[in-house]
Amino acid sequence: MAIDLTALLSGATPSSATVSPMAMYKKLQKLAEQNAQGDETETAKEKAAEITRDFNNAAVRLRNKQYKEQNAQVQNDTVYYKNRAATAATSAELVNDDRFLKVLAYGNGFGDLYLNNRQKLRDILLSDLNDPNSAARLGTLKEVELAKKYNFGATGDQYDVDGNAIGYDPDGKLVNDGTGSPPLPASLAKLRGLVIDLNGKAVLTDTPAVPATDNKLVQSIGLAEGDARSYATSQTKALLQEQKPPEKSSVNAVYEFESTEYQKFRERSDVQLEAVYYKENIDGIKTVDDLFDSKNHRLLKFILNSYGLAGEEQYPGKIRKILESDLSDVNSLANRFQDPRYQQLAKDLSLPFAGVVKLKLGSTTQDMVTRYERLAYERHLDEQAPGVRAAIEFARRIKDVSMTVQLLGDAVLREVVTVANNIPQELAYQEVDSQVTALERRVDVKALKEDKGEVEKLVIRYLTFKDTGSSGVGSQSYLLNLFG
């Protein structure tokens, strides 16, 4: 719904026209009520999305619990597999161990055969590769390669190329110096990491043995280690990620004064000039120092204007200390100022924790521009109806006030409460404690926070003085008595 400003104008031409602040405020209130319905719709959508997200996340947590249990079992299987590979006395006992066979099968891409025909898998592994009628030789090339990889079908004890028997020393290490006892079965040689030639003999290195070395056997990383790794890779479940709620913007999705009039205003070239400059140049900010560099004064000014802090760019040192404050510290500068606009800006930018990373996000830039356009529009309305912006800002921000002194420290809030209560501007010359005492005689902050009716009453009184052109000075004001 567009605000028909012509209906509010008094005077023959735009140049001489003025708008009643009270009439403008009433129009804006009506528009805000209509837009609130859209805001409620957005809130309902967010709630529905939250419920769906919670339901999905509950399912994710349940599935992850199952995955963790499965992964723990996979880990146990790999440990079991390596221990069995290192301690078994024969290949037959390994192949007939279903738990061992499972790791070997899945680690080599034979999971389907393990599930559907376990006996055939055993026969392949135990095949005599010299027998053309063995299970491996009658099977696929992949099955032949599997049988060759382990050579579980080999018979007798293992010897090296020089004819030396290979066995285990007292420490369990493979040796070929004649002291080995018991002997190593040939069917376990490859599993234990020995390199075997085409004749089935253990290969020896050509490098002379180092005195500290027991033998010259060529050994590779044991097959068991590779099998365990492959099995774990294929069977370990990646945990699912829970859906995170979208980052909540500090800017309302629905602008309370959204209208055709507002859309036309925000499309004006003079309005977009600063917004376009900001969007095109904010990516050039690489560090916090850059943000406060004098050459980027225009960008800092835009940011502060977007949060209703116009003019504060004159004090970059102060602003930097505020924005770098730790909001969890009640004594930090941002908290000591007690102005929620400073605190919101510090929270949104998160400079102490994110540097300028968050500042340069596309979502942050969009929020900044949105804030700038809305505040520019409200200043535009105030030019036509002086006082209306202070009125709507007061109604919007009074919820963030907890102490009377905060009213005095904020130019907008101070303007509304002092004019509405017929308090002379000379109050500012008194000590702060005296100002607070004088204001508390007329203004109850707690009542304003808890009762929208009290806020409305005060705002109407303020606008009435604005409408009549009264300065609000004079304790016997007729209007003050009327509304008091």
Image: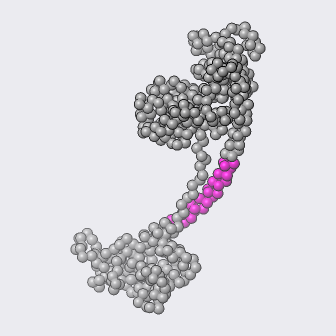
Q: In which quarter of the image is residue 260?
A: top right
- Residue 429 appears left or right of 228: right
Please give the name of the residue rendered at 54% of the width and 27% of the height, measured from the top-left corner: 309
Q: Can residue 321 be seen in this view?
A: no
Looking at the image, residue 21 lies above or below residue 133: above
Name the quarter where the N terminus is drawn.
top right
Nearest the viewer among 479 and 233 is 479
Please give the name of the residue rendered at 54% of the width and 63% of the height, measured from the top-left corner: 237
Nearest the viewer among 270 and 409 is 270
**Magenta highlight on residue 74:** yes
In x, y percent, where is residue 478?
A: 75, 10
| Prevailing secondary structure of the magenta residues | helix
What range is drawn magenta here?
A: 47-75
In x, y percent, where is residue 169?
A: 34, 75
**Magenta highlight on residue 204:** no
Please give the name of the residue rendered at 62% of the width and 28% of the height, measured from the top-left corner: 378
Which residue appears farthest toward the front when viewing the image? 12
Please give the name of the residue rendered at 71% of the width and 43% of the height, measured from the top-left corner: 41
Nearest the viewer among 375 and 235 is 375
Looking at the image, residue 311 lies above or below residue 252: above
- Residue 345 appears left or right of 193: right
Q: In which quarter of the image is residue 257?
A: top right
Name the quarter where the C terminus is drawn.
top right
Q: Can residue 197 be seen in this view?
A: yes
